[in-house]
Amino acid sequence: MAKEIVIGTRDSALALWQTHWVLDKLQKLNPEYTFRVKHIKTQGDKILDVALAKIGDKGLFTKELEVALLNRDIDLAVHSMKDLPTTLPEGLVIGAICERAEPFDVLISHKGYTLATLPQGARVGTSSLRRRAQLLHFRRDLQIEDLRGNLNTRMAKLERLDLDGIVLAAAGVKRMGWEDKISESIPYDICLPAVGQGAIGVEIRENDEEIMNIVNKINHPDSADAIRAERSMMRKLEGGCQIPIGALGLIKDGELTLQGLVASLDGKKLVRSSVTGPRQEAEELGEKLASILLDMGADEILQQVRQETDEDDS
Ligand SMILES: NCc1[nH]cc(CCC(=O)O)c1CC(=O)O
């Protein structure tokens, strides 16, 4: 009988879509194994009524899966790369980063608005600090409403809260089959994506060579190098708290260009820059861009954000 490999996943509709996408690929490329899915509830799936920025979202969608990996309850965990913290627990590694879908954000609005044409003071839903800051930087007049929950809940809130629009990741919207609801693909100069946005990753045990060989077949080197650079930038910038950070790595002719930004929560301050270099130096490029941003004023923004989130906690 074929050896069974257990894939751990969250059980949101998006997570299940992503997991079955990964499973199909793995099964085709590794016919000698049988793959099975195990659902695991994460903290982020249970706490739906508290703003993410308040509880801190590091590992909120991944921790229980990581515990299951370390306990050998599962052999690999499928994550949205954007939800995977930049530092992994001891003993776990990223086994593969799959080919990235569109990394940009989209506006969903019944009236077909774009960010530029939304009426004065329009109410736009997002719970991401990164989106909030960049939207406010672009349009100081917008009223940003908190929008916690999985994609289905967020879409329901567009109606229930009678919002003028909500901002979501294009990749998730397409995976849910909601393309027809998109009223604008938001350009990168207005909104730089989250680190890892649009890519699905596989986390495995560090010394598990058998699983490493199985998942390596679905690794996409261009996506992996781009996202390694983004994660390296973020690792150097963040200090244990949630901050508005955007990043996007793109590979062309063997060269990696990494764009990045850091913004204040109100979007008033925003520093943005980019670096280009050999793709083999993805991690160094990420650190270099982080240093450039810090020199440009990101250090002050970070201090300010830390103070503001501390006040929130008390
Ligand atoms: N934070 C939730 C999350 N994690 C991954 C995606 C979308 C899919 C992706 O970016 O890979 C989403 C939804 C969203 O931000 O709109």
Image (cartoon, rainbow, N blue to C red):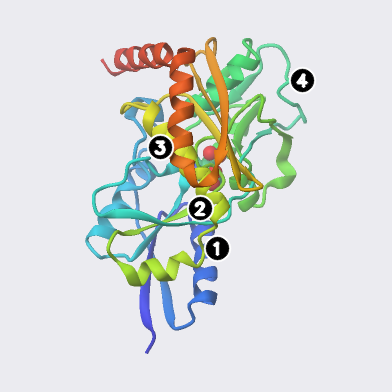
Residue at the spot of label 4: 117
For the N terminus, give its image quadrant: bottom left
Spot occupied by residue 222 in the image (x, y as percentages of width and height): 57, 51
- For badge 4, the amino acid type reads Thr
Q: Considering depth in this image, is 189 or 307 the residue closer to the camera?
A: 189
Residue 268, located in which quarter of the rendered image? top right
- For badge 1, the amino acid type reads Trp
Spot occupied by residue 101 in the image (x, y as percentages of width and height): 62, 50
> Circles 4 and 1: CB distance less than 8 Å?
no
Mark 4 or 2: in front is 2
- The extreme bottom residue here reads 1
Whether label 2 lies within 8 Å of ligand 1 gets the answer yes
Measuring 29% from the left and 18% from the top, which residue is drawn there? Answer: 313
Left or right of 282 on screen, residue 190: right
Spot occupied by residue 184 in the image (x, y as percentages of width and height): 73, 33
Spot occupied by residue 144 in the image (x, y as percentages of width and height): 56, 19
Whether label 1 lies within 8 Å of ligand 1 gets the answer no
- For badge 3, the amino acid type reads Leu
Residue at the spot of label 3: 48
Residue at the spot of label 1: 21
Q: Real-space Cα distance between discs 4 and 3?
A: 31 Å
- For badge 2, the amino acid type reads Ile
Vertical relation: 198 (above or below) 221: above
Q: On residue 200, which mark appears?
A: 2
